[in-house]
Image (cartoon, coloured by chain):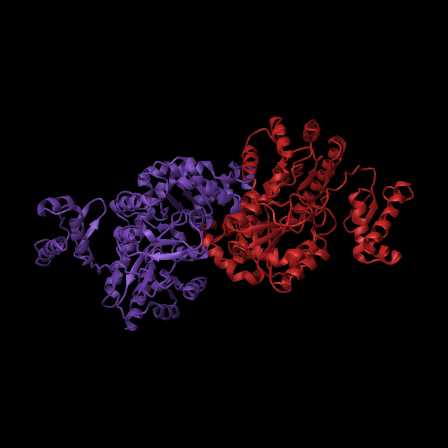
Chain colours: A purple, B red
Amino acid sequence: MKKDFLYQEISQNIARLIKNNVLKAGDRLPSVRMLCTAHGISMNTAKRVYLELEGQSLIESKPQSGYFVSGRRKLLPLPETSRPLPAGSEEEPEQLIARVYDNMGKPGLTLFSIGVPDQRLLPVARLNKEMIQATRRLSGGGTAYEELQGNEKLRLAIAARSFSWGGSLREKDIITTAGGMNALSFSMMAVSKPGQTIAVESPVYPGILQLARSLGLRVLELPTHPRTGIEPDALKKVLPQIHLCLLVTNFSTPLGSCMPDTHKREVVKLLAERNIPLIEDDLYGDLYFGNSRPSCCKAYDKTGHVLWCSAVSKTLAPGYRVGWVAPGRYKEQLLQLKLSHAISSSAITQEVVAGFLESGRYDHHLRKMRRTLQHNCDHYTQTIAGHFPPGTRTGRPQGGLTLWVELDKRINTTDLYASAIRQHISIAPGRMFTLQQQFENCMRLCFGLPWTDELQHKLQQLGRIAAMQL
Amino acid sequence: MKKDFLYQEISQNIARLIKNNVLKAGDRLPSVRMLCTAHGISMNTAKRVYLELEGQSLIESKPQSGYFVSGRRKLLPLPETSRPLPAGSEEEPEQLIARVYDNMGKPGLTLFSIGVPDQRLLPVARLNKEMIQATRRLSGGGTAYEELQGNEKLRLAIAARSFSWGGSLREKDIITTAGGMNALSFSMMAVSKPGQTIAVESPVYPGILQLARSLGLRVLELPTHPRTGIEPDALKKVLPQIHLCLLVTNFSTPLGSCMPDTHKREVVKLLAERNIPLIEDDLYGDLYFGNSRPSCCKAYDKTGHVLWCSAVSKTLAPGYRVGWVAPGRYKEQLLQLKLSHAISSSAITQEVVAGFLESGRYDHHLRKMRRTLQHNCDHYTQTIAGHFPPGTRTGRPQGGLTLWVELDKRINTTDLYASAIRQHISIAPGRMFTLQQQFENCMRLCFGLPWTDELQHKLQQLGRIAAMQL
């Protein structure tokens, strides 16, 4: 096709300029729009040029700044877009998941396998103070049932923050839940029936697979790009087969992908045309490394069929179990499910989070936390680039908590897990994140741990263990 | 039948002795065993004699003491055993329930309709202190995920208390949940599939009906005696039709019935023979008025098919959402469901409850609370006996929080609700507690409100409003 030819020609030309040092490390590249004009190509083709060069690690994007020639930092190539089978054999990696989770409780492990920020990144002292104030503010110190829809102050604060991602929620649009997973659970129950099919990313957070299967749903994994998430074209093809869709739109785990605005808008439109509900898991949206928060599919939702879910589990307090959902047109079903399965949420932890958000400390905390995470992520990618065996590729998350690492095809990360755990290192093998036989040379590493010399040594050690598998 | 004849003859004889003042108010009657020996009858026949006399309010049982001729206290007759249709039309009283719940939020109402103890009956100050200590004890002040099975100290304390009802649980047998309803929800999900049939009491707590229907289950309501709960014989007949059973074995709401040990043992045996799981909701077991706590079906469970559920929602802190289940043979399924739908429980409130239970304050608090509730219940029954229209019958709860009131057949309590709410009194109409057209002359009143002159006037006023319906 002409388009294919064009994008390859242009990207090869730019690659040549970089390799010949005409374009130097740190040089800014023309904007996507300028590239369009200069070559008479479409926006999509221009974007594809830069994605291709980024995949080769020749250039890198800086959020809100544009594209630059890669600098001294050595960047490994990106993994390729996943290609799950259209109708995969559904084999849940139950035993592997159970093994990884069971081991995580053992003391003395370096937990690259976790998916939550380390406690040292959380404002624990401040939250403890809020706890005392919350018991004083609440009627009966939080012993009384909260109203069914959830703490009103908390819902007001969440609604106010929705402007940061292009939303315009009101408090009455939001229902609180016992954490983010509980929001996904009620959402899935509200919009699905056993035997129906749900479309998800691939690789995908195993909790989503387990939840879907516990509700008797069939799972369809979609081709997913490590930077931009699911491919709208791939979704389009399977629309007749699916009844609902669940996407982690911003800094998904394990990939760290973030859907571009154009994809978000297109996906919402495609699904709306067929009345297919979209459960949007926006658990990581506040953990962006760039200058501003990415948007949400919910921002483009005109028909109310997007159920926007989030929580403070990745930013503030996993153990509080404070989450929420803006369920759009499914509000009545959500309220009924919450009443039937839970009566109400835990009053005290919601009040603590409401107080923290109201105080304005949340933004301050997030700024600090984002800096730390970005810093950690850079250290991880650099260390991996220097100490992992040839053939290694890494995702390039622009936010979130986790890094996807693809190793040489000959390395099986389930075996690597077994070798690493003997050296007190825990990783999350790629097979955990799919129902199919794929990602067996991949793993997820959490960079929500404080970066120390010891952690660096452990990561280097992991690289050596990986090399020994060859 | 000879047996029928015998029990009637003996009970008529005793009734005559009481009416002729041979047996006087407060006189102790022979024990059930002595009655057997004296008349050469079976234990069951002897018990039936006393149940019959109790139904006529001629005698009353005092827990752990035996039967006595009714005293000066005027006791209204007991409602009869419910007789739901074997295959009822399933019409959920959704709108009625929504109306009652919505109105409950309005200020200035006397809430006879609630199902939780008033805050003034709870140890709020002490719990607030425990909250501060818990944030200090917990790693990260409760921000960290708790282990999947739940707070170990809490599970140890619950296991230790199981001796009080004949159980012998270990901490590893227990999984904590976000409140009692959440325990029922996970239990029902673990042992049922959509389209299956669940047997429950009739009348039954509406949350159980809503939960069952949200999981696509068919509900079969069982004939239920206002003192002794479901009839084992009735259960026996429907065994081939049902796939699971849920019973509130001790001081159920709305009836306040408590299954005798013999019934508990028989029901467990019947269900075990057919491998039918029993979800036992023991939410009210600690709120007994007698000298000792009633047993649980779980105590007779030899095969692990009883899932024993409870919580502190009715005794300590409804808003904390701290509950648990001892799921027997279904432990793995329960853990998987908890992981998939919730990840973990709220860490802080579990630690507070664990601390309170460990301190030994729980028993002290329960003693006080039980005295208050028994006292309130007596006041309610006396006030109703004195101020409600002829034809009124009341349950005779030996524990729990609620009183079942049956009015003259011509009074519709849904209409009564409308009249009462205009006078700022909220009741729970009988139709809320069934999927069938029954209990339309019944209502549930909560006696977990502090007994004051004002409350007494409100109850008398309710009697007058009821009389006006005639």
Q: Position of residue B39 (x, y in %)?
A: 88, 56
Q: Position of residue B48 (x, y in %)?
A: 79, 51
Q: In the shown orientation, is residue B222 left or right of residue B196?
A: right
| Rendered view: B306 above or below B136 | below
Q: In the shown orientation, is residue B40 left or right of residue A63?
A: right
Q: Position of residue A72 (x, y in %)?
A: 17, 57
Q: Position of residue B135 (x, y in %)?
A: 50, 48
Q: Is residue B157 among the parts visible in the rendering? A: no
Q: In the shown orientation, is residue B71 left or right of residue B215?
A: right
> Dividing the picture into quarters, in which one does residue B365 lie?
top right
Along the line of sight, the residue nearer the viewer: B223 or A288? B223
Q: Quadrant of the C terminus of chain A?
A: bottom left
Along the line of sight, the residue nearer the viewer: A272 or A459? A272
Along the line of sight, the residue nearer the viewer: B96 or B453? B96
Q: Is residue B380 among the parts visible in the rendering? A: yes
> Which residue is drawn at the image coordinates 36% and 50% (left, top)?
A245
Q: In the shown orientation, is residue B123 left or right of residue A426?
A: right
Q: Quadrant of the N terminus of chain A?
A: bottom left
> Which residue is drawn at the image coordinates 78% and 44% (left, top)?
B55
Count of marks overlaid on the render: 0
